């Protein structure tokens, strides 16, 4: 029997007991078996949950390790590019070419750096997206205040310690 079938079976037994007025020995045995089977299924599911949790942790640790390697390679890449750039500028050489590569020191088109945002004219400002403050809405709903377009949805969760 699958875990989701147990509540149906229990409901059926309760309905039979209600209709007949009492539980006979067969129903009691079935009820005990139902409870034991359900408990065993839940424990087995929890074992899988724990194993999957360990896998999630292991994969997360590997991702962190690989991100560290990636950052190390990126740092070396940036350093080496800057080193070659600085040396070419120091030698006043803006082009190095061979059969495999062409290396050039070229001017960039430029970039904007904001020094004083308050001084920027209005025509250059964008109002942007409205950000919904869900935590403030949650606090208001919990206090009993009605927030149009929002509702407080409660559910249950499984906690394993």
Image: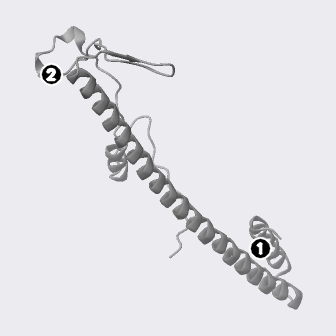
Q: CA distance from mark 1 to mark 2?
A: 67 Å
State whether residue 9 is above or below residue 99.
below
Q: Which mark is residue 159?
A: none
> Which quarter of the figure has residue 105?
top left
Q: How is this picture coloured?
A: one colour
Q: Residues within 10 Å of mark 1 (few under 14, many from 20)?
A: some
Residue neighbourhood size for the residue with mark 2, other residues' Cα within 10 Å, grouped as few (<14), some (14–19), many (≥20):
few
Question: Please, what secondary structure does the residue beneath circle 1 have?
Answer: helix
Asked whether residue 149 appears in the rendered view, the answer is yes
Which residue is drawn at the image coordinates 46% and 56% (left, top)? 65
Asked if 9 appears above or below 109 in the picture, the reply is below
The residue lying toward the viewer, choosing from 121 and 66, is 66
Between disc 1 and disc 2, the foreground one is 2
Give percent across and percent down for residue 9. Answer: 81, 71
Q: Which residue is mark 1?
A: 10
Residue at 36% across / 53% down in the picture?
A: 142
Q: Is residue 151 left or right of residue 137?
A: right
Residue sitting nearer the eye, 124 or 106: 106
Q: Is residue 104 above or below residue 130?
A: above
Split into 4 quadrants, where in the image is the N terminus? bottom right
Q: Which residue is mark 2?
A: 117
On screen, residue 94 versus residue 17, left or right, reads: left
Q: Determine the residue positioned at 62% across, 70% down.
A: 51
SS of the residue under disc 2: helix
């Amino acid at each position: 029997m699958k875990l989701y079938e147990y509540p149906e079976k229990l409901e059926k037994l309760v309905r039979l007991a209600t209709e007949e007025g009492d539980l006979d020995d067969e129903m009691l045995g079935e009820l005990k078996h139902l409870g034991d089977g359900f408990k065993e299924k839940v424990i087995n599911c929890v074992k899988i949950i724990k194993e999957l949790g360990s896998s999630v942790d292991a994969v997360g640790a590997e991702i962190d390790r690989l991100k560290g390697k990636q950052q190390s390679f990126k740092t070396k890449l940036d350093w080496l590019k800057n080193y070659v750039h600085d040396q070419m500028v120091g030698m006043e050489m803006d082009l190095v070419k061979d059969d495999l590569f062409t290396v050039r020191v070229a001017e960039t088109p430029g970039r904007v750096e904001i020094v004083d945002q308050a001084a920027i004219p209005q025509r250059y400002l964008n109002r942007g997206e409205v950000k919904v403050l869900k935590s403030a809405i949650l606090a208001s709903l919990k206090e009993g205040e009605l927030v149009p377009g929002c509702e407080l949805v409660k559910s249950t969760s499984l906690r394993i310690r």
